[in-house]
């Protein structure tokens, strides 16, 4: 229920978390699963069944979280699920650090792209995610995502996005200048052909003592500066977070609920 309104809606998004990640962000809020300390090995057939079970529960879409390193398996599972009647939009929810070859494997399978765009600064990308070339990779990836969607966002009669790109940017403490560079780049490059989700929910959940400059929550004033900048440069297709979002828990319990067939969970 915690995705953007056009993803979750009232019914919720059918979110599937994949263990592991191709980034190593020091502040990862899903570190329990991104570092592969949680998870269960399943077959392609079981993954296809999970997609269908989420459909049957009334999910608005199938939402693949940190899926990059499983793409060939996911494509096989989507093919199988489609043969059994899956028609829901598929959301690709990633850290934005993608190869073009991987994304082209997904053409015709993904309807909504939901990438992060974390950094413009190579220095910050290396320090916090171990990926000096993050901007180069992520900017090329987003261009490919926009190409695959035809550069437009489409919604159903209930306001659920069925095709398009939403770029997420999490504002980091003390990094508002880089956030402004990200927003400027996205708006100059794509204008109103994409949505931008500007997030304020940064909360230290891991040991960040080696990174004292981000070892705190984002202040309201920092976030408001970034939102004010977005308004001044003309960004209108954006989602923002209000209130004390960082006080809320957006982290699910990684207890493998729904992963194994019901008959094998006891």
Image: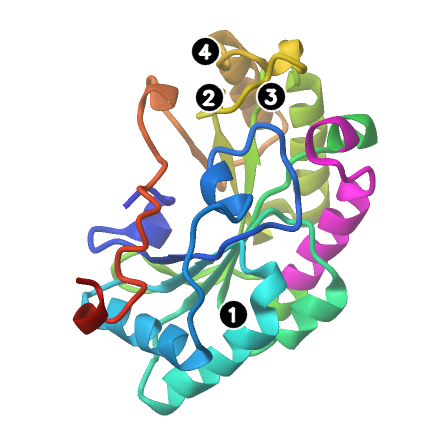
Of residue 104 and residue 39, the one placed in the foreground of this image is 39
Name the element at disc 3: helix
The quadrant in which the C terminus is found is bottom left
In the figure, residue 141 lies in which quadrant? Answer: bottom right
What kind of colouring is applied to the model shown? rainbow
* Mark seen at residue 110: 1
- Residue span colored magenta: 126-146
Query: Residue, x 59% and y 32% (percent of image)?
Result: 234
In primary-sequence order, the first of circles 3 and 4 is: 4
Q: Nearer the viewer, mark 3 or mark 4?
A: 4
* Mark seen at residue 203: 2
Task: Give the Cα distance between marks 1 and 3.
Answer: 32 Å
Name the element at disc 4: helix
Q: Is residue 137 magenta?
A: yes
Q: Nearer the viewer, mark 1 or mark 3?
A: 1
Q: Position of residue 233 (x, y in %)?
A: 63, 28
- Report which residue position mark 3 lands on: 229
In primary-sequence order, the first of circles 2 and 4 is: 2
Q: Can I make out residue 109 in this image?
A: no
């Amino acid at each position: 229920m915690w995705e953007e309104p056009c993803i979750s809606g009232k019914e919720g998004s059918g979110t599937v978390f994949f263990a592991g990640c191709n980034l190593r962000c020091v502040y990862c809020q899903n570190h329990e699963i991104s570092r592969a300390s949680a998870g269960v090995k399943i077959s392609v057939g079981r993954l296809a069944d999970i997609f269908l079970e989420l459909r049957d529960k009334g999910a608005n879409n199938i939402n693949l979280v940190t899926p990059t390193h499983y793409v060939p398996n996911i494509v096989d599972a989507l093919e199988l699920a489609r043969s059994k009647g899956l028609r829901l939009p598929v959301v690709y929810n990633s850290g934005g650090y993608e190869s073009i070859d991987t994304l082209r494997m997904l053409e015709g399978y993904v309807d909504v792209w939901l990438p992060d765009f974390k950094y413009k600064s190579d220095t910050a990308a290396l320090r916090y995610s171990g990926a000096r070339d993050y901007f180069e990779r992520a900017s090329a990836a987003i261009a490919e995502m926009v190409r695959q969607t035809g550069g437009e966002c489409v919604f159903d009669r209930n306001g659920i996005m069925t095709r398009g790109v939403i770029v997420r940017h999490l504002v980091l403490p003390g990094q508002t200048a880089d956030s402004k560079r990200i927003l400027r780049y996205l708006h100059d490059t794509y204008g109103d052909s994409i949505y931008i989700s500007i997030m304020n929910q940064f909360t230290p959940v891991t040991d960040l003592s080696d990174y004292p400059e981000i070892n705190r929550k984002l202040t309201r004033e920092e976030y408001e500066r970034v939102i004010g900048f977005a308004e001044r440069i003309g960004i209108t297709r954006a989602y923002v977070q209000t209130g004390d979002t960082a006080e809320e828990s957006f982290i699910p319990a990684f207890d493998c609920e729904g992963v194994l067939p019901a008959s094998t969970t006891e």
